[in-house]
Each structure stands twice: as C-alpha cells, then as structure tokens.
Amino acid sequence: MNQIEQLRVEGEALLAAARSAGLAAAIEHCPGWDMQRLVSHTAKVFQRTAVVVTEGLMEPPANDRFTQFAKDEFVFDQFAEVLEDLVEALGNAVPNAPSWNFTGADLTNVFWVRRMLNEAAVHRWDAQHAAGGAQGFTPELAVDVIDELLFVLMPVLSAKKNPELSATFHFHCTDTDGEWLTAFTAGSPITTREHAKGQLAVRGPASSLCLWAWNRLPATEGGLEALGETSLLEAWATIVP
C-alpha cells in the first residue's frame, strides 16, 4: 500500500472511531479536547494541505480560505469530504513540485504526503482510544512516525518548550530496525540514526515506542523498558509537540 492510500485508510478509520465514540468523547492525550475538536482540527489541517498542494503555494493560505467546521454531527460528513479532497490533491500532485511548509525545509509536495499520513495515524489512534479500542501501528509506519518527530517536528516545534534542557535520549525498536539518539543542548535537539548510549534509553516494540514518543503511552506499558536516568521521562513529556 502506498502512502497516499494508507492516508485514506487511516483517515477513514479515524472517522469510523469518531462516529462510534460521539462528539462529546474526551481525547485523553490532547488535554481539553473532545472528539468534535479532534475531528475539526484534523479536517482543517487536511484542508490547508490540499489548498497548498493544489495551488503550489509558497506561503500559508489565509484563514478565510478554510471551512467553518460544524459543532454537530455534520462535521463527520465535512471530514469525509475534506479527506477525499486531500487524497485527490496529493495523488495528482507532482511529488517534487514546490510547496510551502512550516519547517522552511524540504519545500516540496513529498513533505506533505508523509506529514498527512503521520498526522492521520496519530489522531486515528486518539479517536480509537476514545472509542475504547485503539489499534497500534505497523512497525514500518511506527518507525517513520518516530523518525519524522525527531528529525522534522522536534527542532521546529519543541525547541522553545524547555530551553534549559540539556540531555540525551536513545530510542531503540526491538522488533524492527530503528534506533535514534537525540541530544538536547539548551533546548535545541540534534538527532542521529545510530546505536549510542543516551542518558535515558527507551526500548521496545516500534508501535509502543512511537506511542511513548508522542506522549500516548507510559514507558512502563506495551513491552517498553526505560533505562538510565528515568527522571528524564518527565522532561521528554514536556517537549513533545
């Protein structure tokens, strides 16, 4: 399955779980969110990306380009329409054609294929968790979600969250290839793909490791093991986007 088709699958699974749980269901790992906000947030991200890719924009589109998403169950139909528009936009896009993104790097449509798949996957898990039956990720997808978090999102979105942090974190998948070392110096992270000793190491199955990295699962569950300076688990939780 290619990434765009996988995006469709993840989006449809998110929607199915959202309908099952209902709009008022709390989203445990997004404090203050209910299902209506999760669905409308994800739909807005999808819609913005479709506009950027379709029009080849090199700056973010104005807010007045976006739909006002419903507060009632009509939001589910809006989400389905926006998901279909996004899949179509990415499927028709030239992969290496230029388009804006918030990182200032890799300014091509390929960036958005990966970003939207991983966005859908994490929030699909959130919706399923709220509905009472979350499924994990395939090892391949989990590794990519971790890799994107560490290399792409963390430097842009997390550097200012804990400006005093100077520590090293080792991530180790035990069921597939995937190891990273992220070193923070005064809150600024640098990641390498390697087997190296960190002050804190978290190891376990890729799906569980991915969920821990995104603050969705404690480092004591899902077959995970935390080694070294476990006091840094709390620090990690403060810097995830």
Image (tube, rainbow, N blue to C red):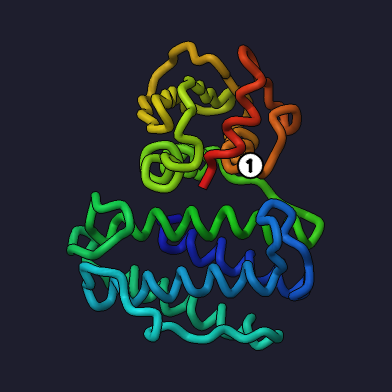
Residue at 47% x, 20% y is 168
* Above-or-below relation of 147 to 227: below
| Of 203 and 32, the residue lying toward us | 32
Residue at 53% x, 39% y is 239
Q: Where is residue 155 in the image (x, y as percent from the top left)?
A: 37, 40
Q: Position of residue 75 (x, y in %)?
A: 62, 83
* Above-or-below relation of 148 to 226: below
Q: What residue sits right under mark 1 in the picture?
A: 215
Q: How dense is the environment of label 1, judged by Cα within 10 Å: few (below 14), some, or many (20 and up)? A: some
Three-letter code, disc 1: Asn
Residue at 37% x, 84% y is 65
Q: In this view, does 111 lie to the left or right of 161?
A: left
Q: For the N terminus, which image quadrant?
A: bottom left
* Above-or-below relation of 220 to 51: above
Q: Is mark 1 on a helix, strand or loop?
A: loop
Outermost front residue: 164
Q: In which quadrant of the rendered view does residue 102 lie?
A: bottom left
Q: Position of residue 184 (x, y in %)?
A: 42, 26
Q: In which quadrant of the rendered view does residue 159 lie?
A: top left
Residue at 38% x, 25% y is 193
